[in-house]
Amino acid sequence: MLEGLYAAAAGMSAQQEQLNAISNDLANVSTTGYKSGRVAFNDLLYSTVDVAGTLSTDGAGASAKVIGRHEAQGSIQQTGDPLDLAIEGEGYFEVTAANGQTALTRDGNFGVDANGTIVSSNGNPLTPPITLPKGVPPSEVSIAADGTVTAAKHKLGQIKLVTVPAPEHLLANGSGGLTPTAASGAPTATAAGKIRQGELEASNVDVGSAMALMVSTQRNYQLNSTAIQTENQMMSIANQLRANG
């Protein structure tokens, strides 16, 4: 009977993992460029057991984990701000985080700091950095589909979209960005996407689907909880029979 308790408890843990992922998605419905998480379930250890001469399989339940993100394009919305940039297709903007590490993002809500350097909504400069000449306002900045930045008829640099060999292994850094890992591979400037100036990519979270999945996950969680209660009652009956025997 203990195996049943362990399996149900593992099931509750797996459903909780999915609930956490769904909650994170719903919390980021309005986050520019956000990609919804992908959760995968897998069986835990199974073994063959002999019960009264009958062979059967005895398992320890299931587990779940986030295995990446849905890369579907979010809707692109026009803002008119010359430093708002949307990525159409594949790729990420590469920025340098405050700790000096490389971070990737599809949040194209850029601005300029006190030095005129183009920075992300978190204040992280592009990699390589691009700085507007003194006296040149953002309204005079033109950014082509290939990322070429010009102002006052001068080329200031190029915003190159990057990608990694295994995007599903990028690590969320908690600030809306993604950190490359050994499993994801290093960023390379070979992304095929195009930059659209004066627009932003919305989150690709489908609220209706996320809510439906949340209800289903909560029901599964409750079923596992009920299974634990049933196992507890069965163990209590078995103990009473043993004591009375």
Image (cartoon, rainbow, N blue to C red):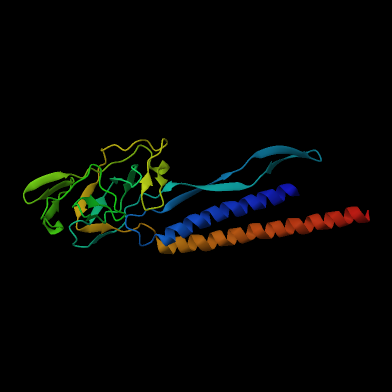
Q: As displayed, is residue 161 above or below residue 73? A: above
Q: Out of 130 and 82, give the one closest to the viewer.
A: 130
The single residue placed furthest to the front in the displayed view is: 114
Q: As displayed, is residue 45 above or below residue 28? A: above
Left or right: residue 236 versus residue 85 is right
* Percent x, y of residue 193: 25, 46
* Percent x, y of residue 208: 43, 64
* Percent x, y of residue 194: 22, 47
* Residue lying at 60% horizontally and 47% vertically, measured from the top left: 62
* Residue lying at 10% horizontally and 45% vertically, measured from the top left: 155
Figure label count: 0
Left or right: residue 107 versus residue 23 is left
Q: Out of 193 and 54, give the one closest to the viewer.
A: 193
* Residue lying at 66% horizontally and 49% vertically, measured from the top left: 7
* Percent x, y of residue 132: 15, 50
The single residue placed furthest to the left in the displayed view is: 153
Q: Out of 191 and 216, give the one closest to the viewer.
A: 191
Task: Using the rendered view, name the quadrant where residue 91 is placed.
Answer: top left
Task: Using the rendered view, name the quadrant where residue 60 is placed.
Answer: top right
